[in-house]
Image (cartoon, rainbow, N blue to C red):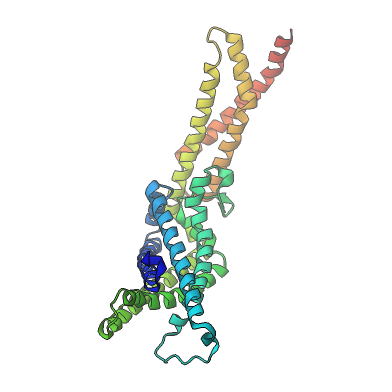
């Protein structure tokens, strides 16, 4: 197959995957611009994407593009080195018009890959991957000592950019991205045959402007995110707290619904015409199973109070009262438990 057996075919694959990656980078910077201008809408986008099937398909496709692009880049580099043989150790006699970036595309790619690993660890692993792995509170990453919803991207902006080294790593990655994209933009068109002097000059100009705008936007976003994170903007903004409250409202309702379902299951397992067995089952349920619901309810109330202290979440307030009532019922059941055991022994 000529896409793998010939140098031109391999370069074509590099160009094709490069086009797709340039489009993705452009989409990504626009999505980040939403976080810059309207953080609440950014969280809506994150929730919309999440771990939905279309987002997962897109993520898998994007990962495949990156892997293919990297694999072919290494393949072409090794091929070129073998073709040059010992000549690569000679004094460089390339004409001055050859760009520095064209001679260091692999190195630039490695720097971008390292930056990408950091970025994926800070965001993708804590958001989309976390949704796939577990929704348990104990498994969620913490922001300011409180579990963070994987759909709330602003919390992960807070977590990432409150670190002093994050903007440093990002800006280094953006510089490498500028050189890599600036050369790669026109080079991929050169590969498919747009190689006359008129079009190459135009494409170099377009590529320079396109890349510069994208990288400047990325850099501006990193700076703003860092300033806001150090000001705790993503933790104190009222509208964002309302969004965080929606997450805890759903958690509160889930605790109540889970308790009611568990209690109903116990009651169904006991004959209705046997009051003694019914009472024994109730006592056992409140002594053995109900405390776990109290503990979970108390955690939800505590975490919601920390993450959205300025917002009143009705379901969470109700859950707090429910936990207090449940504690009283557990205490009463524990008092009855010795009597019930004594009756059974007789």
Residue 309 visible in the displayed image: no
Image coordinates of residue 209 in percent, x first then y, are 33, 78
| Above-or-below relation of 334 to 3 | above
Q: Quadrant of the C terminus?
A: top right
Image coordinates of residue 178 in percent, x first then y, are 42, 76
| Nearer to me, 10 or 314 | 10
Q: Residue shown at 56%/51% (left/top)?
A: 141
| Above-or-below relation of 141 to 255 | below
| Nearer to me, 86 or 14 | 86
Q: Residue furthest left?
A: 198
Q: Quadrant of the N terminus?
A: bottom left
> For this view, does 145 lie left or right of residue 334?
left
| Above-or-below relation of 217 to 336 | below
Image coordinates of residue 104 in percent, x first then y, are 48, 80
Numbered-mark total:
0
| Nearer to me, 49 or 111 | 111
Residue 207 visible in the displayed image: yes
> For this view, does 185 lie left or right of residue 124?
left
Q: Residue shown at 44%/90% (left/top)?
A: 94
Image coordinates of residue 186 in percent, x first then y, are 34, 77
């Amino acid at each position: 197959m000529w896409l793998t057996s010939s140098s031109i075919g391999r370069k074509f694959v590099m160009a094709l995957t490069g086009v797709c990656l340039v489009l993705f980078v452009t989409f990504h910077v626009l999505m980040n611009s939403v976080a810059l201008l309207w953080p609440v809408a950014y969280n809506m986008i994150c929730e919309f994407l999440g771990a939905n099937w279309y987002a997962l398909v897109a993520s898998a496709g994007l990962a495949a593009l990156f892997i293919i692009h990297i694999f072919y880049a290494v393949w072409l580099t090794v091929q070129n080195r073998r073709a040059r043989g010992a000549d690569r150790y000679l004094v460089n006699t390339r004409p001055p018009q050859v760009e520095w970036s064209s001679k260091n595309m692999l190195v630039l790619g490695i720097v971008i890959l390292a930056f990408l690993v950091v970025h994926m660890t800070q965001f993708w692993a804590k958001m989309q991957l976390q949704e796939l792995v577990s929704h348990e509170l104990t498994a969620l990453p913490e922001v300011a000592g409180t579990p963070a919803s994987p759909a709330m991207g602003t919390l992960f902006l807070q977590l990432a950019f409150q670190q002093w080294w994050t903007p440093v790593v990002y800006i280094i990655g953006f510089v490498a991205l500028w050189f890599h994209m600036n050369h790669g933009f026109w080079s991929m068109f050169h590969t498919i045959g747009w190689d006359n002097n008129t079009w190459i000059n135009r494409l170099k100009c377009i590529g320079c402007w396109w890349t510069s705008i994208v990288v400047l936007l990325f850099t501006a976003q990193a700076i703003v995110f860092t300033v806001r994170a150090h000001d705790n903007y993503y933790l104190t903004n009222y509208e964002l707290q309302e969004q965080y409250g929606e997450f805890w409202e759903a958690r509160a309702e889930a605790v109540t619904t889970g308790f009611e379902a568990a209690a109903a299951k116990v009651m169904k397992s006991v004959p209705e015409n046997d009051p003694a067995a019914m009472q024994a089952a109730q006592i056992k349920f409140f002594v053995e199973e109900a405390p776990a619901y109290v503990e979970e309810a108390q955690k939800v109330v505590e975490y919601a109070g920390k993450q959205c202290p300025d917002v009143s979440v009705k379901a969470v307030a109700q859950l707090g009262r429910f936990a207090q009532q449940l504690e009283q019922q557990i205490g009463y059941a524990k008092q009855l438990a010795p009597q019930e055991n004594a009756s059974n022994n007789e």
